Image (spheres, helix red, strand yellow):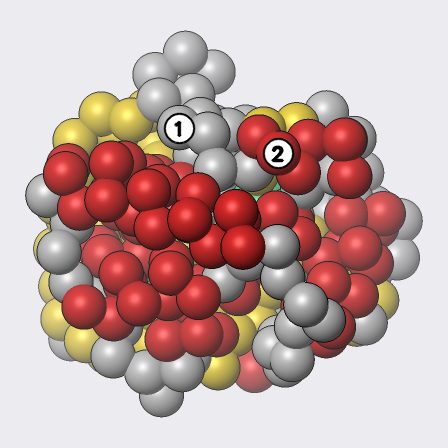
Amino acid sequence: MEEKANFVDMRRMMVENQIVSRGIKEKRVIEAFLKVPREMFVPEHLKECAYQDGPLSIGEGQTISQPYIVALMTKALDVKGGEKVLEVGTGSGYQSAILAEIGCDVYSVERIKKLAIRAKKVLKELGYNVKIKIGDGTLGWDEFAPYDRIIVTAAGPDIPPSLYNQLKDGGIIIMPVGDRYFQDLILVKKIGDRMEKKNFGGCQFVPLIGAEGWRDEEEL
Ligand code: SAH
C-alpha cells in the first residue's frame, strides 16, 4: 500500500516534538514509532488527527492512547525484541504494533469484540502477527503464560494477582494504577518471591479497566 508522504512527515514530527523532546531516546522505541503508521489505527474521519499530542476516540467509548504514553510505557517495559509480552486492552492495536515492530511476541486481550476484530484485521494487513483474544484481560491469558513482560493499557485500582502469577521470574509489569481521575504508572518487577514496585510518575487519564463487555472468550 502506497503511503501518503505527509503521514511520514507527521510521524517524524510526532517523534521529535512529543517523544524525544520529553526525554525518550531509546533507539528501539524511536525506530518503532517512526515505522508504525498510526493513522491506520484510528477511524477514517480522524486519520488527519492521528499524530496529535493526545488520545483519540476509536469508538465503543474507548480511545487510542496518547503517543507519549505509549512511548513511555514501551520504554518502561525495557524490551529488546524476543520477549513474550502480554497486553491487557488491545483497543486500536497500536501498542501491540509498536511491540511487534520491536520484535516482541505479542499476546493481547480485549473485552470489546468489535475492537478486537478490527485491531486483528489492521495488524494482519500490516504484517504483524499478534495473537488476540476476546475476554477479561485482568485474568491474563493462562494458555501462553508465563510472560517476560505484561503491559496493562487501562487503569485499575491495583495490579491484578492473576497477571502477577503469569509473570516470569525477572519479568516486568507496567500498569496505570489509580481511579478515573488520576493514575500513577506503576512498574512491578518479580525477583524470586520478592515484588519490587516503582512509581514511574503520574499520567493523564486513560480508560478504566472494565469488568464486563464480553460473553464468551474467543481467540481470533
Ligand atoms: N492499547 C490500546 C489502548 C486502548 S485503551 C491502544 O494502543 O489503542 C484500553 C482498552 O482496554 C480499551 O479498548 C478497553 O476496552 C480495554 N479494556 C478495559 N478493561 C479490560 C479488561 N478487563 N480486559 C480486556 N480489555 C479491557
Question: Could you say which disc has been placed on residue 126 in the image?
Answer: none
- Above or below, 102 against 20 in this view is below
The extreme top residue here reads 181
Q: Are marks 1 and 2 in contact (CB under 8 Å)?
A: no
Task: Tell me where residue 63 sits by quadrant.
Answer: top right
Disc 1 packing (10 Å; few <14; some 14–19; many ≥20): some
Residue at (42, 49) in percent of width and height: 9
Residue 108: x and y in percent read: 60, 64
Q: Amino acid at mark 1?
A: Asp
The extreme right residue here reads 215
Mark nearest the camera among 1 and 2 is 2
**In-image side of 108 versus 112 (left or right):** left
Q: Quadrant of ligand 1?
A: top right
Disc 2 packing (10 Å; few <14; some 14–19; many ≥20): few
Disc on the earlier residue, 1 or 2: 2
Residue 72: x and y in percent read: 26, 46
Residue tagged 1: 53
Local secondary structure at mark 2: helix
Residue tagged 2: 48
**In-image side of 174 versus 112 (left or right):** left
Residue 142: x and y in percent read: 58, 74
- Above or below, 127 against 21 in this view is below
Local secondary structure at mark 1: loop
The extreme bottom residue here reads 82
Residue at (37, 75) in percent of width and height: 102
Which of 166/204 is in front?
204
